[in-house]
Image (tube, helix red, strand yellow):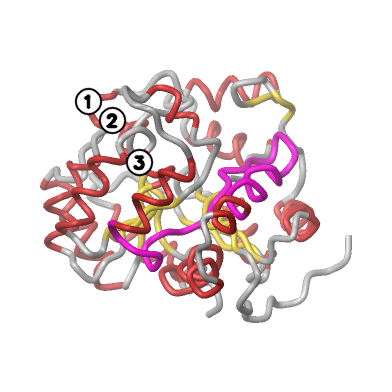
Amino acid sequence: MAELQNAPATRPGQVIDAHCHMFSIGLFEEYVTKHPDENPRFSRAVRERKFGKWGDAIPDMTAEEMASWYVERINAAGVTKALVVSVVPDSQYMRDFVTEARGHVHALCNLDPRLPEAPALLESEIAAGFKGVKLLPVNRAFSLSDPACRPFFDKAAELGVSFILHYGVSVDTGVDMRFADPIDLSPVARDYPDTSFVIAHFGAGYLDQVLKLAYQCKNVCVDTSGTNNWMDFMAYPMTLEQAFERCLMSIGPERILFGTDAGTTRPYREWIAFQQRRTLEEMGVSDTDRDLILRGNAVRIFGLDD
């Protein structure tokens, strides 16, 4: 694999995948060594060297090899840059991956905002090159309105950090749906108005609540990532075009970010990228607004061209 050069700034018309994943043997082994009893899914992945709903093989590469391979696969799909959302905290493998990707692929760190050490860890992760934070309240069963999270959000505001948040349904069967409602974010988004909060997957079944929250808090955004099969479980019909239409009308193109939710155990999700781009074109969304959704908003919110 050719050595990567530093990525140039993106241009209008190019595409950034603002929500994707990176799984590797080295990443999971590092986590399980540090936390042998904390996540059965990750321990099983290390034993079986497989991960995900379909039990797909996990790539076994160094961080440098993974960075080169990752850039090749997104570029082959017509994607210029990507933002990986971490699922493990305090990972040297992820830090090395970010460094080796040289701005072609960025990452959000992952941590538990309730922990006393969370503010200090956040500061060190941002210094290491992470562009923000991915939090999974429904998967990890915590509430962001918990007062224990306040020191963490104070530090995030001080550092100018932005977030992607997973509420709603999940492929992780161990989730606690009591923590799935994004309305829980309301006091946090209200009290930190200069911090951007991007709610993943159109809210993953909670689009109504996301849009109500976004009405009250102008710093709440959505991303479009994934198969969006949560639509199959709605009590009323919903299509991808309708989801886009409601978001465009309610919160505007400046608060919508494109993503695929692609991982590394299966081929890059070109079909999702195609489906979403085609939907926006068929809706007649202007070139300027499509560029915001497909590139510009991710650059602005997460500093991906800095």
- Image quarter of residue 29: top right
Q: Dot 2 surroundings within 10 Å: few (below 14), some, or many (20 or more)? A: some
72, 107: nearer the viewer: 72
Q: Which residue is mark 3?
A: 203
Q: Nearer the viewer, mark 2 or mark 3?
A: 3
Residue 8 in percent (x, y) is at: 67, 81
Asked if the residue under mark 1 is in contact with the one under mark 3, i.e. CB atoms within 8 Å, the reply is no
Residue 81 in percent (x, y) is at: 64, 65
Q: Earlier in the sequence, mark 2 or mark 3?
A: 2
Q: CA distance from mark 2 to mark 3?
A: 16 Å
| Circle 2: element type | loop
Compared across the picture, whether 239 is left or right of 203 comes to: right
| Circle 1: element type | helix
Residue 287, compared with residue 199, is above or below; it is below
Asked if the residue under mark 1 is in contact with the one under mark 2, i.e. CB atoms within 8 Å, the reply is yes
Q: Nearer the viewer, mark 2 or mark 1?
A: 1
206, 125: nearer the viewer: 206
Q: Is residue 254 magenta?
A: yes
Q: Which residue is mark 1?
A: 178
| Residue depicted at 19% across the width and 64% down the height | 154
Find the magenta span and give its range. Answer: 250-277
Q: CA distance from mark 2 to mark 1?
A: 8 Å
Quarter of the picture holding the N terminus: bottom right
Q: Earlier in the sequence, mark 2 or mark 1?
A: 2
Q: Is residue 236 magenta?
A: no
Total labels drawn: 3
Give the residue type that dot 3 points to.
Gly
Give the residue type that dot 2 points to.
Ala
Residue 64, compared with residue 112, is above or below; it is below
- Image quarter of residue 27: top right
